[in-house]
Image: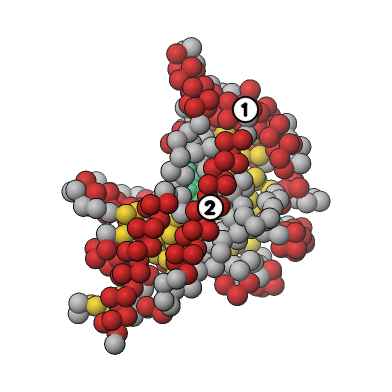
Amino acid sequence: MKISRRASEIAPSLTVAIDARAKELLAAGEDVVSLGAGEPDFDTPDFVADAGVAAIRAGRTRYTAPTGILELRKAICDKLKRENGLDYSPDRIVVTSGAKHAVNNAVAALVDPGDEALVLSPHWVTYPALVRLYGGTPVVVECPAEKGFHPDVEALERACGPKTRLLILNSPCNPTGAVLNDDDLEAIADLCRRRDLAVISDEIYEHIVYDGNVHRSIASLPGMAERTVVVNGVSKAYAMTGWRIGYTASPLPLARAMGRLQGQTTHHPAAPSQHAALAALSGPSDCVERMRSAFAARRELFLRELRSIPGLSVPAPEGAFYMFADVAKWAGARVGGRTLAGSADLCEWLLERERLALVPGAAFGREGRIRLSFAASEATLLEAARRLREGLAILDAEAE
Ligand SMILES: Cc1ncc(COP(=O)(O)O)c(C=O)c1O
C-alpha cells in the first residue's frame, strides 16, 4: 500500500519514541523511572470527574455542535474575561480534542503551501511538524540561554521575510519554562503589527508559574486580538490530559473556518468530556492553585537535587513543569566502546543503563540539553536524580 508523501514525511517524535521504549521496559517488569511525560501526575479533581460521569448517565452522549456545546463556549468566554481580560463571544470559540488539536486547526486554517511560520526555539515538538504537514516552512529562531530563553526580538525581525505569515508563541514554554514578560510581549506585538503577522499563542501552562512570574496573553495587547489565535485547554491546569479538551479563541472568520475544518474531520470532542470541562471552568479553582503549589514545592526539591550533581547546570524554570538541564559537558562522551554523540544518544544510554527515561533536547531543537518533567512524586524525583547522578558519574569516570 502506498503511503502518502505527507504522512511519510512526518518526523517521528523523539518524545514518543523514548516514552514507548520506557513503557516496553516497564511492561517487561523493569524498574524504570520516567520523567519523560508532559502531564500532571494528579487525578482529575472529583467534582470534574463526577460531572463527566453524570453527563454519561444523563445521556449526554450524542453528537454536539462541531464547535462544542454552547454552555462550554460561554464558560470559556467567562474564563477568558475573568482570567485574561479578553472579550470573546461564544461564536469565536472552537472547542477541540485537546490543545494539540487546537494548534492543528489553527495551523491548518492559517498556513498555505509556501508560507513561512516563525517558531521560537527551543520549541514544543509539534509546532514545526504541523507547519510542515500543511506545506509551510517553519523558520526556527533561537531564544538564547543567556537571556533565560526569552526571545531575541531583533533575531525574529531578521527572520521575517515576504512569505512570513505566522508566529507561534508558547508561554509558559515547554521545555524551557520561560514566561514572556511585558517587555517581550510589547516588542513581539509591535513586530506582528508592523509585519502583519498572525499569532498562535499556546497558553496551556498559563496557571503553572513560579517566583511571582505572571502569565499575560498577547491577545490582551492593543490591536492583537484581531490577529491572534489563543490556544488553551483544561489538560494541564485541571489534570485532564486524557479527557482531550482544548479550545481556540480567535477572530470570527477564522473561528468559522476552523469550525468547518472540524465539522469535516473529528466533528467535535467527546460530549461527556465537554461537560466535565464545563464543570472545571465554571467550578471552584482552588484545585488549580493546590496543584500549582505542589509543582512549586517539587521544583525547589528537584532543583536542589539536580544542582548538586557535579557539572550539571540547571536554570530555574519560570513556569510549566520541566527542567531544561545543560548536559553539553557530556556531548561526545565515550562509554562501553560507543560514543554518545548527542542528547538523544545520552537519553537512550541513560534509559538502558540507569532505567531513567528523559527527553533529549534535540526533540525541542536544542542539542546539549535534556528535559526532565517534575510532574512526578517527590520519591520519584529523588530516585531520578540519584540515577542521573550515577549515570553521569560513570561517564565522568570513563573520561578519566
Ligand atoms: C506546549 C504544549 N501545548 C499543547 C500541549 C497539548 O495539550 P493537550 O493535551 O491539551 O493536547 C502540550 C502537551 O504536552 C504542550 O506541552
Write the residue at 45% across / 35% down.
43
Write the residue at 49% across / 64% down.
304
In depth, the one of 155 and 211 nearer the eye is: 211
Residue that label 2 marks: 297
- In the displayed structure, does residue 350 sit left or right of residue 377? left
Give the crowd class for mark 2: few <14, some 14-19, many >=20 residues within 10 Å: few
> Earlier along the polypeptide chain: callout 1 or callout 2?
1
- In the displayed structure, does residue 269 sit left or right of residue 359? right
Residue type, label 1: Gly
- Mark 2 and mark 1 in contact (Cβ < 8 Å)? no
- In the displayed structure, does residue 95 sit left or right of residue 334? right
Q: Quadrant of residue 361?
A: bottom left
Residue that label 1 marks: 283
Q: Quadrant of residue 67?
A: top right
Residue 205 position, x and y percent, is: 57, 48
- Position of 253 relative to 367 (above/below): above
